[in-house]
Amino acid sequence: MTTRRLAVVTAGLSQPSSTRLLADRIAEATQAALERRGHEVVVGVVELREHAHELTDNLLAGFPSPRLRDVIDTVTRADGLVAVTPVFTASYSGLFKTFFDVLEADSLADMPVLVAATGGTERHSLVLEHALRPLFTYLRAIVVPTGVYAASSDWGAGASGGGSLQRRIDQASAQLAGLVDASAARGPIDPFDDLTPFERLLSGEDG
């Protein structure tokens, strides 16, 4: 049995939050889908609200604190990512964007990503296609075809949209599991992998 690491980034500000609830439901569905494919799954959840000050310090200082570095490693070394944000002003939240701003270039390249968002009304569902998908495409991640948006009407006992939301979660999670299953496991990134050999430096070659 192989091990796959799933990172879950959630940018909800309240506690509890519908953003975290959606993230948990997607993570559970993805884990189940991967286990059906014969994988052991390790899930790492990142609550960005707990790192807001450290993210600001990173922007100002140019490097992360040890605790934030651990969080960044949890995400960049994962085999798949679930990224969930509340909708603020018809886009992702500033806290959500700040986290992905501090990641090193290409650290999410070729990583399967499931994008999801929460909002008060169904009218904001296009944030998945107009904001989240372009962001992760720019980061060279592989975004699964189905995104998941949950409006206020999708929650609560007897909510008419509840069944539809679970179907979207199951569909998107199955797509993410399929991409993670098909990809090679990502290991720790070695910053010395691409160094120019000393002999080439002496010869004047820049590599």
Image: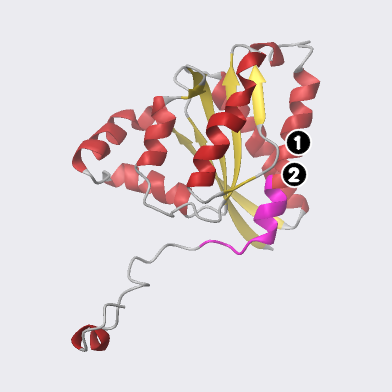
Q: Mark 1 and 2 residues: CB-CB less than 8 Å, in contact?
A: yes
Asked whether residue 184 is drawn in magenta, I would say yes
Q: What span is in magenta?
A: 176-186
Q: Residue 128: which quarter of the image?
A: top right
**Which of the two residues, 115 or 177, is positioned nearer the viewer here?**
115
190 part of magenta stretch: no
Residue at x 62% of width, y 59% of height: 3
Q: Is residue 11 left or right of residue 60?
A: right
Query: Based on the displayed image, in which of its 4 quarters is residue 207 positioned?
Result: bottom left
Which residue is depicted at the point 54% across and 45% down? 137
Q: CA distance from mark 1 to mark 2?
A: 6 Å
Residue 76 placement (x, y as % from top left) = 46, 51
Marking on residue 142: none
Q: Main secondary structure of the magenta part?
A: helix
Under tag 2, what secondary structure? helix
Q: Report which residue position mark 2 lands on.
A: 174
Considering only vertical position in the picture, is 106 above or below 86?
below
Reply above or below: 158 against 144. above
Q: Is residue 117 above or below residue 2?
A: above
Q: Is residue 150 left or right of residue 52?
A: right
Residue type of the residue flagged with mark 1: Asp
